[in-house]
Amino acid sequence: EKGGHDYFMLKEIEEQPEALANTLRGHFSDGVVLDEQRLSEQDLRDIGKVFVVACGTAYHAGLLAKYAIEHWCRIPVEVELASEFRYRDPVLGRDTLVVAISQSGETADTLEAVRHARTQHARVLAISNTNGSQIPRESDAVLYTHAGPEIGVAATKTFLAQIAANYLVGLALAQARGTKYAEELEREFEELAAMPEAVRSALSTVGKTRELAARFSESKAVLFLGRHVGYPVALEGALKLKELAYMHAEGFAAGELKHGPIALIEEGLPVVVNMPSNKGSSQLHAKLVSNIREIQARGAHTIVIAEEGDDAVRPFADELIEVPAVPTLLQPLVSAVPLQVLAAEVARNRGYDVDKPRNLAKSVTVE
Ligand code: BG6
């Protein structure tokens, strides 16, 4: 039942192309199709502000929604931990869309954030993997990620599916608000639709990542760096390592290095760097290369995740993991793969139960 693997999580990592394809299937035909829609076109057109609320891995997927929705729809987006949201009296109204992301659809913090939003007359759109769960039931619109059941407590395929779902929500808003032409929407969707294949090819990094994990499984700590959409991926890489391998791990926006975290760098410390594409955003690429040189000079062991053919970073990577070149906003879908495998395999090497990490539950129904 684990598909020949030692643990479910690896099977679920390998199911990601399918999970993505299933999430996209049926959600686009002449525009985005939601699973449930109790909002009018006018309601969507009137949205002037978006909040994304979620916990854990879903929150990291939510952070990525901001890049796509702001870029495509020209609406300000705030992403907030569901457990913090209602305690600070956020400014909400009928023109606010709250996107609640929850694999289980039952997470108490996220559910309470939804209930709070509704008391303030905000519109709520749920992204969930569980049909008929509580959060979708209490929302005005629902987009289901059809990733299939996830056994591993640490989210993997549902994370990728949530990212895709966010992008669909971004396209739906762009469509309603008219910030994108039908052909542009179609083109963005086509790029998304090509991602299951790209993720399949990113799975070819599994073997190399397992070897790396074996070498670093006794490290004291691991740092993760990224910029732009690579930053939430760095946070997710660190969370996975904490959850599964009980290892101290932190994700940082690489630009913040010099404002503090660089003090943590010491001889032999593994630092995982998520490189942006060397094509479009080459300015960021050059900045990341200079970050890598700075930390290397201070003794860090750099594990670099870069797109295939990125020869500029090669000389500075102690270890290089190459993922397929894809459009910038979609890069997290491929770069997350080696980070998931790294965490799972470090945990396995340390003798831990990868599918059932200590102290954690798949769904947390208390606040
Ligand atoms: C945590 C799980 O307790 O809840 C995480 O261990 C998950 O893996 C988080 O990301 C949020 O869960 P959900 O179901 O709301 O997406």
Image (tube, rainbow, N blue to C red):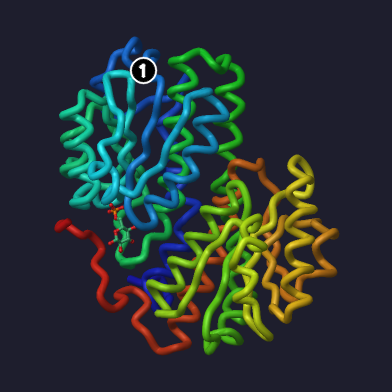
Near-viewer residue (281 or 342): 281
Q: Is residue 177 left or right of residue 325?
A: left
Q: Quadrant of ligand 1?
A: bottom left
Q: x and y percent of residue 108 in the render?
A: 18, 51
Judge by depth and name the residue closer to the eye, 203 or 274. Answer: 274
Does ligand 1 reach within 8 Å of label 1's beta carbon? no
Question: Dot 1 corresponds to which residue?
Answer: 44
The quarter of the picture where the N terminus appears is bottom left
Q: Residue at x 49, y 60 (%)?
A: 235
Q: Which of 359 and 92 is in front in this view?
A: 92
Q: In this view, does 204 lie above or below 46?
A: below
Residue 23 vertical position relative to residue 8 in the rendered view, above or below: above
- Disc 1 marks a residue whose amino acid type is Leu
Picture quarter containing residue 224? bottom right
The crowding category of the residue bearing disc 1, from other C-alpha atoms within 10 Å (few below 14, some 14 to 19, many at least 20), is some
Q: Report which quarter residue 193 is drawn in.
A: top right
- Provide the secondary structure element on which disc 1 rests: helix
Q: Which residue is drawn at 28% across and 32% down?
A: 142
Residue reaching furthest top? 42
In the rendered image, residue 88, in percent from the top left (x then y), is placed at 27, 42
Within the image, what quadrant is residue 128 found in?
Answer: top left
**Figure quadrant of the C terminus:** bottom left
* Residue 328 pos. (x, y %): 65, 42
Q: In this view, does 160 lie above or below 259?
A: above
Residue at screen point 63% across, 74% down:
263
Which residue lies most toward the front here?
259
- At x 24%, y 42%, the residue is 86
Q: In this view, does 186 lie above or below 253?
A: above
Number of labels in the image equals: 1
